Amino acid sequence: MENKYEKMWQDIGLDVPLHKELLESINKSFNATVGAQQNRPLGMKYFDQVLHESHGGRVAELIENKARGNKTVGTFCIYVPDEIVMAVDFIPMPLCGGTNFSVPYAEKTFPRDICPLVKSTLGLAFSKTCPYAPIKSMAVGETTCDAKKKTWEILAKKVNFHVMEVPQKKNDLDKKIWREEVEEFKNKIEALAERKVTPEKLRQNIKIMNDKRRALQKLGELRKHDPPPISGLDALVVMQGALNDEPVRFTQNLNKLNQELEERITQGISPFAKGVKRIMISGTPSVMGNWKVHSLIEKSGATIVVDESCTGTRYYENLVTENDNNIDKQLDALAERYMKINCSCFTPNDDRITDAVNKVEQFKVNGVVHYILQYCHTYNVETLKLDAEFKKKNIPSLKIVTDYSEEDIGQLRTRIDAFLERLE
């Protein structure tokens, strides 16, 4: 891969030697976690390749798209409506980092005691190892956490940057504000593209994204089986690919994987034995490069059957209303759908509490692991309300607060083993 894409990396201004070190670090982590699994579905080969080509073939596609007069819009959160970006033939591309390799490069400028995801993302850009940063035409941030909000002020001075205001409540006034933010975002994209978002193109791309969500929903349903036909770690790899891959191609390959998983269920094929302890991961996202907690849980003998996170059900569980050719009604539908995402930035956040409890029942969960990135105060504090509800259902839980480093792996393994013994 290095030789094949080295000139491309040089042309877009990456620090090629350092970038090779980054890829070696990520591949080492991948091989020790995802690649070390047994009895994987054959269809996972495609999604492994999506991850491996995320700095190669996918970047080449973005450059080709740019040569055709289109642009790439970098995003940091699943609140950004991809459908609007795609409606002008632009490509939305996540910029979040999930590797500890880049964190020291951010800490030269930013405080050490802020979110690892923010530091990993910034470190990739500052060290010239993020291939998306130099080819994006605009970046879009949002106001879901304090670390991000203040970071955007710094980045906005250096690049074409737009910030979407995500309200902190879900009252009628807040929904009105969010609807205006969605329309303002559409206007910003139209100005960048120098063409209008048409109802026809928007409807087409709403359907494309809904089809992807339907395929992911199907995968979620298949994970309800005992034993599940796929590991939670592989399901996470699929979700990480969903954020990065071309959506139509992704959906086609996921539909093939889902068909294979149905056949595995019929044949009784699974990476796990029947009766395996079933875990729900709840909390912060696990973006590409980060497989630590999922791997530790499943190496300890349990399986993750559902992810209540932004790299899980929050990404795909709600669809946008289709079949409308009126741009205002389409924006209404987009605003309504994206406002349903249960981020911990909301207060009160009763919808998330209810949703998490329902998932415990639907997926026959034996225990919940709260996965919290360091300094993510909203998710950390919200575990108190979640645990109060889980206690009523006699569902044990374990809170893990960690970063992307491997320094705490031994300690986490011990805690996870002890937690799983409690489930016995």
Image (spheres, helix red, strand yellow):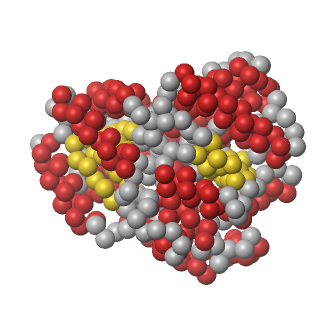
> x%, y% of residue 345?
45, 40
Quarter holding the N terminus is: bottom right
What x and y, as percent, mark residue 208? 67, 33
Residue sitting at the far bottom: 17
Residue 343 visible in the picture: yes
The percent position of residue 106, horizontal first and vertical second, equals: 52, 70
Q: As drawn, which residue projects farthest toward the front? A: 173
Say above or below: 345 vs 22.
above
374 up-or-down from 106: above or below: above
Q: Is residue 132 left or right of residue 230?
A: right
Give 390 or 268, whichever is nearer the viewer. Answer: 390
**In which quarter of the view is residue 269 placed?**
top left
Q: Residue at x 72, y 32 (%)?
A: 183
The C terminus appears in which quarter of the rendering? top left
Q: Is residue 222 visible?
A: no
Decide: is 160 above or below 232: below
Foreground pick, 30 / 91: 91
Q: Residue at x 29, y 42 (%)?
A: 383
Q: Residue at x 51, y 50 (%)?
A: 240
